[in-house]
């Protein structure tokens, strides 16, 4: 256990709390950024905006859009 001479624990608690808050806020922002980059919502919305004929040219039907977008992650 570390010993800190002349350190008031009442002052330490709010400071540590603020540092922890900043740490977790930064961590959360990084996680949100990662999730946004991995999001495939835009691709799903684009394919959903196509006509059935345009989807047929791509070899998919409207009910297969999500499976098509996530085909690299699914074992269908």
Image (cartoon, rainbow, N blue to C red):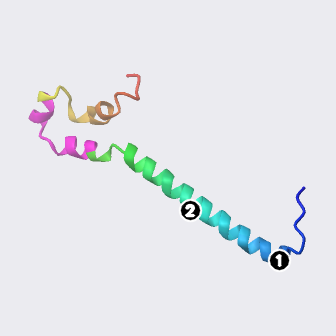
For the residue pair 53 and 68, the one nearer the viewer reads as 68
In the image, what residue occupies the spot 85% across and 76% down? 8
Give percent across and percent down for residue 64: 27, 31
Name the element at disc 1: helix
Q: Is residue 55 above or below residue 6?
A: above
In the image, what residue occupies the spot 49% across and 53% down? 30
In the image, what residue occupies the spot 15% across and 33% down? 55
Q: Is residue 53 left or right of residue 32?
A: left
- The N terminus appears in which quarter of the rendering? bottom right
Q: Which residues are magenta?
A: 43-56
Q: Which residue is mark 2?
A: 25
Q: Is residue 33 magenta?
A: no
Identify the image quadrant of residue 18. Answer: bottom right
- The C terminus appears in which quarter of the rendering? top left
Which comes before the other along the chain, label 1 or label 2?
A: 1
Q: Is residue 6 above or below residue 39?
A: below
Q: Which residue is mark 1?
A: 10
Give percent across and percent down for residue 26: 54, 59
Secondary structure that dominates the magenta span: helix
Please tell me how many numbered marks the rendered image carries.
2
In the image, what residue occupies the spot 88% across and 58% down? 2
Give percent across and percent down for residue 46: 21, 45
For the residue pair 14 and 53, the one nearer the viewer reads as 14
Q: Is residue 47 magenta?
A: yes
- Are dots 1 and 2 in contact, CB under 8 Å? no
Mark 2 Cα shell of 10 Å, populated few (<14), some (14-19), many (≥20): few
């Amino acid at each position: 256990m570390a010993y800190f001479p002349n350190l008031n624990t009442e002052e330490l608690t709010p400071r540590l709390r603020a540092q922890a808050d900043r740490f977790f806020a930064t961590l959360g922002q990084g996680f949100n950024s990662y999730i946004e980059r991995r999001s495939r919502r835009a691709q799903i919305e684009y394919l959903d905006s196509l006509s059935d004929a345009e989807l047929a040219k791509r070899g998919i039907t409207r009910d297969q859009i999500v499976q098509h977008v996530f085909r690299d992650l699914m074992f269908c």
